[in-house]
Amino acid sequence: MTLKVGRIEKVSGPLVVAEGMDEANIYDVCKVGDKGLIGEIIEMRGDRASIQVYEETSGIGPGDPVVTTGEPLSVELGPGLLEAIFDGIQRPLDKFLQVSGSNFLVKGISVEPLDRDKRWEFVPSVSEGEAVSAGDVIGTVQETAVIVHKIMIPFGISGTVKSIKAGDFTVKDPIAVISTASGDKEILMMQKWPVRKGRPIHKKLNPIEPMITGQRVIDTFFPVAKGGAAAVPGPFGAGKTVVQHQIAKWGDAEIVVYVGCGERGNEMTDVLNEFPELIDPNTGKSIMNRTVLIANTSNMPVAAREASIYTGITIAEYYRDMGYSVAIMADSTSRWAEALREMSGRLEEMPGDEGYPAYLGSRLAEYYERAGKVVCLGKDERIGTITAIGAVSPAGGDVSEPVTQSTLRIVKVYWGLDAQLAYRRHFPSINWLSSYSLYADRIGNYLDEVVKGNWSNLRTRAMAILQEEANLEEIVRLVGIDALSEKDRLTLEVAKSIREDYLQQNAFHEIDAYSSLNKQFIMMQIILAFQDEAQRALKAGVYLDKILKLPVREKIARSKYISEDEINKISDIKNQLVSEIDKLIEEGGIM
Ligand code: ADP
Ligand code: MG
């Protein structure tokens, strides 16, 4: 079918208006200009199409041709996604570099997202004559050392397996034929899916299991469920990117999709240099084995940034459909929203709050609602999850702005990064008083059952101490430290220990970067044991100043640097604590 050629009427940055487009539909992908720049129709009025163009539009102008492909913006799904790095519309950046030579992005070059030459060993798991329908797994490919890629029947196909073969195939080779009511259908290892549409599922479930991040302040106080959504708002330099990198590195999701969205290019370069070197504590292999990177940094075209988060979440859904737990990070959704605002402005839409379009909130919701815990389509019961974590960068850290507010209406976890804490080098700078997790209670119960009996009690007690600290500090401000009892002063000391010895966690320290749940539990136990023991001594008449000088305190402070293998050494600290306190009591606490 040859499609009618439209003509460019005007070019306004990334927005192109073309007339004579009566055969096109909204959301069609178009080829714009002689070079065939890739664009997507975002508004249709009569035969005039407004097209957001994903490449630099310099050099195209009125009268140039525009043709629609008649297809929505889609991604290719199949073996080869893992370890890849794509741009916002899934062009493989590494291949792009090879084809285009020097420049990062050269206009109009089209490179297939998935490698067409690479052969993958396909192992069938169904036999001829078997009935199959959408979502059923018909075989597997070992995609990386740690991930088995499941080849599923695409949506819209059901019937019986007419033929299926084992062997080495490319993503374009047919590996099976299904007899359906409307004739035989060839199945490839690759399928396509439109990015703006969620992939179908069987049903949604309630998320209750935590995604373990190894970050103490998150896992202990503000956990996110596998299948939940979290926002990380914070001003420039507060640590948003580090938090997201830490979760990408250490989180116990089986698959990670990392979307670098509108932030500086060198941060993505850091990721590219650093991630391949890192070993996943859960598998013992390089974390790239389970990672897909999507980069649309600030130096790349703004419209592709708008698409990048949908490209990312569609890939996430595809692995979820295989039954994996997937985590997707977007850094930063504010830069994404700015792209949305820019396009809306050029469309001359009525601006809402701070110039953002009125549909900002619903677009954000459309993204985050694709997170969740689901029963996947297909006959073997598979449960998959997508956990979505979005950085938000409000100007000046003012969280009352529209992107933060719209996000908070959707997500259930808020890790509020605090400029003051970051300034004092308290990292991660997650403010323990303003942050929250609506999953905390449910996950607390889960951890009590699975990990340790009284985890949630310890957690509640520690949080109460931090809240009491805030109250006591208020009193100190008004009437001075002398107004406090020794017990209250002890509370302040224990709160300080929770903050400095527990919540502060150095992302760049070999051991401290990651704490298992077990280590977190043991560390918290020893900090609170100090409070108990110190109270025992206070009751026996020992002066607080003497208790605070005990050598064991230094050991408690350094417990974060004890490696996971030697974590039981902390019980030696407990013994030392008890004997030092006993000794003080024996001495009668005299100064
Ligand atoms: P943002 O993305 O919010 O602008 P970054 O994540 O780039 O901020 O963090 C800024 C700097 O803060 C980092 O380069 C690092 O020096 C420091 N930092 C942030 N989090 C941590 C952490 N957990 N441990 C140590 N340093 C940190
Ligand atoms: Mg950042």
Image (cartoon, rainbow, N blue to C red):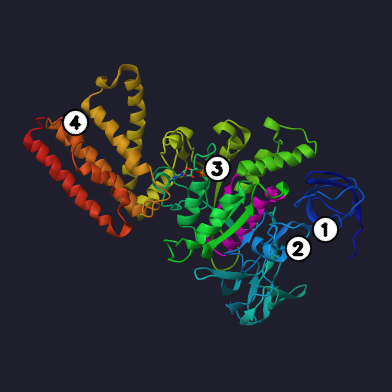
Check contact, mark 2 vs mark 3: CB within 8 A. no
Residue that mark 1 sits on = 36
Q: Secondary structure at mark 4?
A: helix
User: Which residue shows up at 20% across the image and 48% down it?
Assistant: 574
Residue under numbered circle 4: 544
Q: CA distance from mark 4 to mark 3?
A: 44 Å
Q: Earlier in the sequence, mark 2 or mark 3?
A: 2
Labels 4, 1: front one: 1
Residue type at mark 4 is: Leu
257 or 559: which is nearer to us? Answer: 559
Mark 2 or 3, which is nearer the eye? 2
According to the picture, the residue beneath numbered tag 3 turns out to be: 411
Answer whether residue 534 is visible to the viewer in this image: yes
Q: Position of residue 537 (x, y in %)?
A: 15, 35
Amino acid, disc 3: Val
Tell me what residue is drawn at x 90 percent, y 60 percent: 3
> What amino acid does circle 1 point to?
Gly
Q: Is residue 368 left or right of residue 528?
A: right
Dot 2 and dot 4 residues touching (CB under 8 Å)? no
Q: Secondary structure at mark 3?
A: loop
Please rate how many residues cluster around mark 2, counting C-alpha atoms within 10 Å: few if below 14, some from 14 to 19, many from 20. some
Does the CB distance between marks 2 and 1 fall below 8 Å?
Answer: yes
525 in the magenta segment: no
Q: Is residue 370 visible?
A: no
Q: Report the magenta residues as a range.
A: 304-332
